[in-house]
Amino acid sequence: MAEMRLVIGSKDGNTKQLALDEGQSKLVKGLKIGEKFKGELVGLQGYELEIKGGADKEGFPMRRDLPGSNRRRVLLSSGTGYKPKQAGIRKKKMIRGNTVDTDISQLNVFVTKKGKKSLNELIKKEESDQSSE
C-alpha cells in the first residue's frame, strides 16, 4: 500500500499536508467525495473534515460523479480532469471514481469544524513524533 498524503484546506485559504500511515489510510478507505469524517481518524482532535477530491498514485484525478474506485476512460466536456480550450469540445480522458481506495496517494479535504488547537500545532506535533522514531 502506497503512502497517502492528506492535503487539508481551510476557510482562511491556508493548506497543510499530513502524511498518513497505513493504519490511518485504512480508516478513510471506502469513504466517498463529499462525505465528512472525524479528524480523530487521522490525528486531528476536534476537527471534522470533508473529502473534496484526490488523485491516485499515477496522478489521475478522482471525480465526484463517477461511482466506484476504478479508473475508467470517460468522454468529458468539462469539469475535473479536463479543461477544454474551446466550448463544445469533448475528449476521452482517464479518471478515477469517487471512492477512496488503497491506490489513492493524495486526498484533498476541507475543514468543516475546527478543533481547540490550530492545525499548525497538531501537524508540527505529528511531524516531531514521526521524526523521533
Image (cartoon, rainbow, N blue to C red):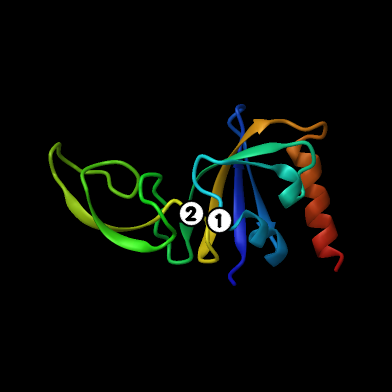
Mark 1 secondary-structure assignment: loop
Q: Which residue is mark 2?
A: 99
Type of the residue with mark 2: Thr
Q: CA distance from mark 1 to mark 2?
A: 6 Å
The residue that appears at 59% across and 58% down in the rendered structure is 29
Q: Residue furthest left?
A: 88
Q: Above or below — where is 116 with respect to 28?
A: above
The residue that appears at 76% across and 46% down in the rendered structure is 40
User: Taking 38 as reference, is 68 left or right?
Assistant: left
Q: Position of residue 33 (x, y in %)?
A: 49, 45
Type of the residue with mark 1: Gly
- Asked which quadrant contains residue 95, the reply is bottom left
User: Taking 60 as reference, is 78 left or right?
Assistant: left
User: Taking 45 as reference, is 22 left or right?
Assistant: left
| Residue 9, numbered circle | none
User: Which of the marked residues, 1 or 2, is nearer the chain's N terminus?
Assistant: 1
Crowd band around label 1 with a 10 angstrom C-alpha radius: few (<14), some (14–19), many (20+): few
Q: Above or below — where is 34 with respect to 76?
A: above
State which quarter of the image contains the C terminus.
bottom right
Q: Residue furthest bottom?
A: 1
Name the foreground residue: 118 vs 100: 100
User: Taking 53 as reference, is 6 left or right?
Assistant: right
Name the foreground residue: 38 vs 16: 38
Dot 1 and dot 2 residues touching (CB under 8 Å): yes
Q: Position of residue 79 (x, y in %)?
A: 31, 41
The residue that appears at 54% across and 61% down in the rendered structure is 105
The residue that appears at 58% across and 70% down in the rendered structure is 2
Q: Which residue is mark 1?
A: 30
